[in-house]
Image: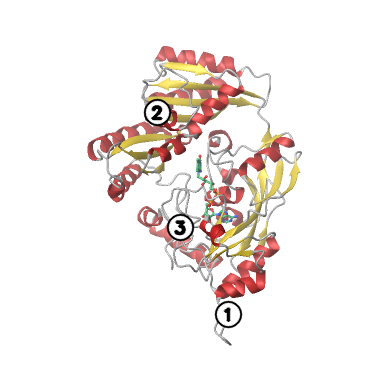
Amino acid sequence: MMPGGPASPLAQLVARCGTEVIVTDPTALEATAVDHRRLYRGKPLALALPRSTAEVSQLLALCNALRIGVVPQGGNTGYCGAATPDDSGAQLVLSLRRMRAVRRVDALNDSMVVEAGCVLAEVQQAAATAGRFFPLSLGSEGSCQIGGNLSTNAGGVNVLRYGMTRELALGLEVVLADGRVLSSLDALRKDNTGYDLRNLFIGAEGTLGVITAAALRLFPMPRAVATAFVAVPTVTAAVQLLADLRAASGDRVSSFELVPQLALDLVLQHIPGSRAPLGGGSPWYVLCELTSARAEDPLAAVLESALGTALEAGLATDAVLAQGERERREFWQLRENIPEGQRRDGASLKHDVSLPIDRLAAFTERASAWVAAEVPEARLVAYGHVGDGNLHFNLNQAPGLPAGALAARETAVKRAVHDLVREHGGSFSAEHGIGRLKVEELQRYASPVELDLMRAIKRAFDPNGIMNPGKVLPRA
Ligand SMILES: Cc1cc2nc3c(=O)[nH]c(=O)nc-3n(C[C@H](O)[C@H](O)[C@H](O)COP(=O)(O)OP(=O)(O)OC[C@H]3O[C@@H](n4cnc5c(N)ncnc54)[C@H](O)[C@@H]3O)c2cc1C
């Protein structure tokens, strides 16, 4: 600080909030500076670790007055660089990791209220302890936070039955950019009182305010489960199999995940302890699961019979049912470890796209043929949540090429894939959001009306542009 001059923004933060809350230790800052995929490296001004909603409110009011950019960071598992500060050294990273109380679980109302810093697995566990089920489930559930899940409107493997995070939220507590607190934690199922403000924060990626707590929807605990790993000849067959299974099981399908042979190979190669459930050699596999809240539901028999019919009809070429919980976990680990297997294999280009389910096969065929013909630097690893029409249309760099060979094609590949997605009536971001990575894509594919309204919403909630600047929308 200059003698007699104004204190620096950081000095003012420390003076008002204390060193308990404003952390400047370089090791702590370094851990927040890089995103999960290592696409972005930022330079945080400091790390804020508030302990209560009141402290978040005080912090944001101060940042708003001082025009300090605030970057909320949950478990930092997001794929779009949305939780990484820029390299100006002027943005404050805000983590709610100290706010992880389960405020209440109300089994009769099928709801719970948790603080936003709770890790997803802790939320699932707290629900289970009360005999209820919180269905959001992702490969990152051991480290992502419910605040991050809400802010990205995360999907995961149970969307087919239970919906995305938005459908699981009954209310939010949010601190606005100016420090005011907006709260709707009464866990009401019906509340048609004007505009639905809470839904604006879900999927907003921290650009409109900081979610500090949420009222979540709970469900009866699944008591019966049947899981199968199935070899299918084509994506068309997989889509038909899903429709047939839903009909045969009385809509008990809770997950239906598509896995190509190459994705399975990457997991088997890079994740120790992985084991192929079937002989191999099929272009595609499906991991499907039926669940029911009735323990006596004969799901294994239903699944076995439906798969028998599918084998006869040529929709499947081989199948195995998990014999017990251990084998079921093994099947799931194969699916959940695909991102990690891909990461360990090396550089990749990722596209998180969604299509109307009936156009999934046509898109996959066209886009795969395009990659085979035009991108010799890549191996295609297209897997995803077929039941939701969501494909992770990813490309891994082919072996033996120099570093950066595939990355050099990124812009052209992204443009071609996303243009094809649009041609097939789909979305260029199904569940991972926009963050920093897809700001240009949103500008390209959203309509002028949508962009106008988004900018107006941003101005209304955050007139000084302090909340996660440059994410979702370009800086004003
Ligand atoms: C192995 C693996 C598997 C994955 N599988 C899936 C999947 O199946 N489906 C899926 O949708 N995603 C998946 N993801 C992506 C990621 O886990 C999700 O996007 C998750 O919801 C991010 O949560 P997070 O706490 O890590 O948030 P972060 O990455 O820390 O942040 C994400 C965004 O939320 C904002 N944010 C965080 N906390 C708050 C808050 N309290 N208030 C306001 N804004 C906040 C951040 O500013 C940022 O914009 C996966 C990731 C990995 C590594």
Label pair 2/1, CB-CB below 8 angstroms: no
- Is 114 positioned to the left or the right of 318 in the image? right
Reading the image, the residue beneath label 1 is 7
Quarter of the image where the C terminus is located: bottom left
Q: Nearer the viewer, residue 424 or 348?
A: 348
Q: How far, Cα to Cα, is label 2 from label 1?
A: 57 Å
Q: Mark 3 points at which residue?
A: 472
N-terminal of the pair, mark 2 or mark 3, is 2
> What's the residue at 30%, 36% (across, down)?
399
364 relative to 218 in the view: left or right: left
Residues 141 and 11: in front is: 11
For the residues bearing labels 2 and 3, Cβ distance under 8 angstroms = no
Sequence-wise first label, 2 or 1 = 1
Nearer the observer, 261 or 198? 261
Callout 2, which amino acid?
Asp
Compared with residue 347, is residue 95 higher up or lower down, i.e. above or below?
below
Amino acid type assigned to the residue bearing label 3 in the image: Val
- SS at mark 3 in the image: loop
Q: How crowded is mark 3: few (under 14 residues within 10 Å), some or many (20 or more)?
A: many
Which residue corresponds to mark 2?
Answer: 265
State the mark number for residue 18: none
For the point 46% across and 59% down, the residue is: 471
Q: Which residue lies furthest to the bottom in this view?
A: 4
Q: In this view, does 143 lie to the left or right of 421?
A: right
Residue 45, above or below 337? below
Instruction: Give percent across and percent down for residue 13.
Output: 61, 71
Instruction: Classify mark 1: helix, strand or loop.
Output: loop
Quadrant position of the N terminus in the picture: bottom right
